[in-house]
């Protein structure tokens, strides 16, 4: 049976689009049932309208404190009864209430090879550090910043003349298929999490 996927996004939504598209084509045994967004002007909201998927906007400024905001997010998330939550360019740290409500059911994509370059502007951090290999990571969401069991990673080269923008574009090209592969594996019940290690997607080819 198709898994119900809830997207959390803050902006452009190109990863969300890739996941939605893979569900529509049948590559992923899932259905995007909703979008939760923390910015009323985010482009992802136009995408959700085009897909015919309900979107809920929950902005931090409308709540007295983080606890009240986190409670509203959890209530909205539970209203969709999702099997899986995909953070797709969601630029906030999830409340622990959400993480505990959906253990090993929240995925994130980060534009770096974790555990390097956590946090904002990961691609800029990579350029400034002078690393020669960068990439993206799809992982289960833990309670720390950009931490949690790693599902898959894709590496890309960093060239001498790269800027934050050129490196971001090269990584983004890999983000979409990497995220789709990870979501597909989740929806096929192929992933197994043992403590910090995820297996099921990286078997050696025989
Ligand atoms: C992506 O590069 C994603 O990896 C990054 O934001 C971008 C969102 O693009 N996420 C993070 O930095 C989270 N720490 P999108 O809205 O087009 O998917």
Image (cartoon, rainbow, N blue to C red):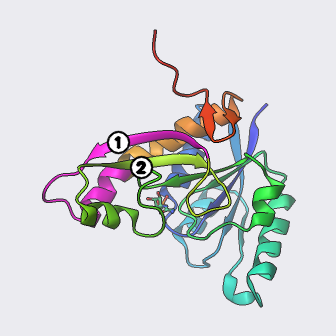
Residue annotated with mark 1: 155
Q: Residues within 10 Å of mark 1 (few under 14, many from 20)?
A: some
The image quarter containing residue 46 is bottom right
Instruction: Tell whether label 1 touches label 2 (CB within 8 Å).
Output: yes
Q: Residues within 10 Å of mark 2 (few under 14, many from 20)?
A: many
Residue plotted at (62% across, 79% down): 40
Residue 143 falls left or right of residue 202:
right
Front one among 123 and 12: 123
Q: Position of residue 169 (x, y in %)?
A: 31, 56
Residue plotted at (61% across, 39% down): 183
Is residue 157 inside the magenta stretch? yes
Residue plotted at (69% across, 35% down): 194
Residue 113: image tag: 2
Relative height, residue 164 to residue 116 (above, below): below
The secondary element bearing badge 1 is classed as: strand
- Report the span colored magenta: 149-171
Ligand 1 within 8 Å of disc 1? The answer is no
> The N terminus appears in which quarter of the rendering?
top right
Q: Position of residue 51 (x, y in %)?
A: 63, 54
Residue 158 falls left or right of residue 67:
left
């Amino acid at each position: 049976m198709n898994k119900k996927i809830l997207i959390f996004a803050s902006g452009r939504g190109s990863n969300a689009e890739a996941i939605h598209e893979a569900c529509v084509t049948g590559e992923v045994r899932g259905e995007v049932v909703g979008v939760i967004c923390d910015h009323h002007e985010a482009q992802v909201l136009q995408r959700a309208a085009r897909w015919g998927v309900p979107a809920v906007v929950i902005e931090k400024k409308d709540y007295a404190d983080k606890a009240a905001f986190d409670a509203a997010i959890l209530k909205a998330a539970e209203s969709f009864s999702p099997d899986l939550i995909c953070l797709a360019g969601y630029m906030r740290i999830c409340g622990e209430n959400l993480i505990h409500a959906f253990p090993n059911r929240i995925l994130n994509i980060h534009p770096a090879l974790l555990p390097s370059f956590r946090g904002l502007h990961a691609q800029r951090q990579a350029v400034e550090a002078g690393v020669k290999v960068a990439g993206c990571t799809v992982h289960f969401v833990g309670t720390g910043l950009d931490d949690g069991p790693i599902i898959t990673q894709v590496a890309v080269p960093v060239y001498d003349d790269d800027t934050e923008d050129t490196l971001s574009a090269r990584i983004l090209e890999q983000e979409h298929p990497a995220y789709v592969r990870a979501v597909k594996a989740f929806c096929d019940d192929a992933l197994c999490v043992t403590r910090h290690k995820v297996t099921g997607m990286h078997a050696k080819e025989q």
